[in-house]
Image (spheres, rainbow, N blue to C red):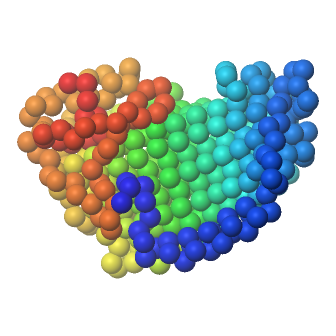
Amino acid sequence: MPANAVPRHFTKACKTARRLAIIIAALALPAHADILRVGPGEAFTRIAEAAKAARDGDIVEILPGEYRGDVATWRQKRLTIRGIGERPVLNADGKIAQGKAIWVVADGDFLVDNIEFRGARAADHNGAGIRFERGRLEVRNSVFIDNQTGILAANFDDAELIVRDSLFAQAPQQTQSLPHLLYVGRIARFVVSGSRFHQGYRGHLLKSRARYNDIRYNLLYDGPQGEASYELDLPNGGLAFVVGNIIGQSANTQNPTVIAYGAEGNAWPESALYLAHNTLLSDRHTGTLFLRTWSDRLPANAEIVGINNLSVGLGSLTLINGGDYRGNVPLPPGALQDPDTLDFRPRGASVLRHFTAPAGAARGVSLQPAAEFALPIGTRPITPPASWLPGAVQTGY
């Protein structure tokens, strides 16, 4: 089973319903899909015009340039939207679609590729680069800068959000509402990989209420200019596979916890957290909880498993958490090569290899990394070594 697969018992009914929806949607598609181009000298000079004209199954291509105040609602059932060449920049410039976002994806199967979203502001202080309402949305190679929320997903328990190789940064310094770089509502499935999150403010770098979460090979490192609260927040439990990530808080963090699980109470039939091969670090000088779980707010049988994680800084991974912990290694401040230049390789790698345990799998999903985060964004595959290092960084020694 692929690393980001959903367990069979969990998705059978959902898959059947989705197959039927896809078949029905396919029958309704036009025989020929058009390519609509947006840009100077093209048939459409504004994205909003293309959003109104596009039909199900079309491809919308956006040429390089800055599109100011060009906000849109997409109501198609199936669509690909992609930037061509140098990434086009969508600057909200004081405009907002439906009072929600630069783009609102209403209810469909969408692919968004190579687009940059900047400066979303809304009256409720939750202005998003993309507001994802319902359906399935995949975002690739895209950038979200200075938005009150980068992507904000609504609460529909059949929705799916996939984010790959994207950047979320520079939360606005507002006090009226917490600006999260990525906020996932109560949806069926959330997958994120190869993506970078930094420079939060008061809110969280990544918050997800999804029923199923697969979070792999990302860099959630707030950096010296960041002031985020949690770096990763899974407030309603659910099934969560957190594998091969670099997750770190700044000295100016608003909260001593790096990863929070179950803080706002359980919302799903099953909850379990599988934390494997992550590098967790903190620049706080007064102590850190690298993981905090709220067992009193989760089901009694909720599994908490931590395997081969590397924690660096003044703090603890297991101090107040129940669970099964194997192969985890704590290191003092200064034990990484140079986090300031994003070099997260641990010193003394040859010794650290002796402490890891077999990562194995849980619920049919691998907990052994198959890749690692690669700057500036993205992943690189890794070959399983003879002996694994704790943490996320396995190559470059």
Q: Who's the residue at 25% across and 66% down the image?
A: 323
Quarter location, residue 321? bottom left
Q: Report whether residue 155 is seen.
A: no
Q: In the visual, does 369 lie left or right of 139?
A: left
The quadrant of the image that shows the C terminus is: top left
Q: Who's the residue at 75% across and 41% down the image?
A: 59
x then y, percent, for residue 51: 85, 44
x then y, percent, for residue 377: 48, 30
Quarter location, residue 23? bottom right
Please state which of residues 131 and 254 is positioned toward the viewer in this rendering: 131
The quadrant of the image that shows the N terminus is: bottom left
Q: Who's the residue at 55% across and 46% down the image?
A: 163
Q: In the visual, does 75 lie left or right of 89?
A: right
Q: Which residue reaches farthest front?
A: 31
Please state which of residues 299 and 283 is positioned toward the viewer in this rendering: 299
x then y, percent, for residue 116: 68, 31
Q: Report whether residue 328 is seen.
A: yes
x then y, percent, for residue 31: 80, 53
Q: Who's the residue at 85% across and 46% down the image?
A: 54
Count of numbered marks: 0
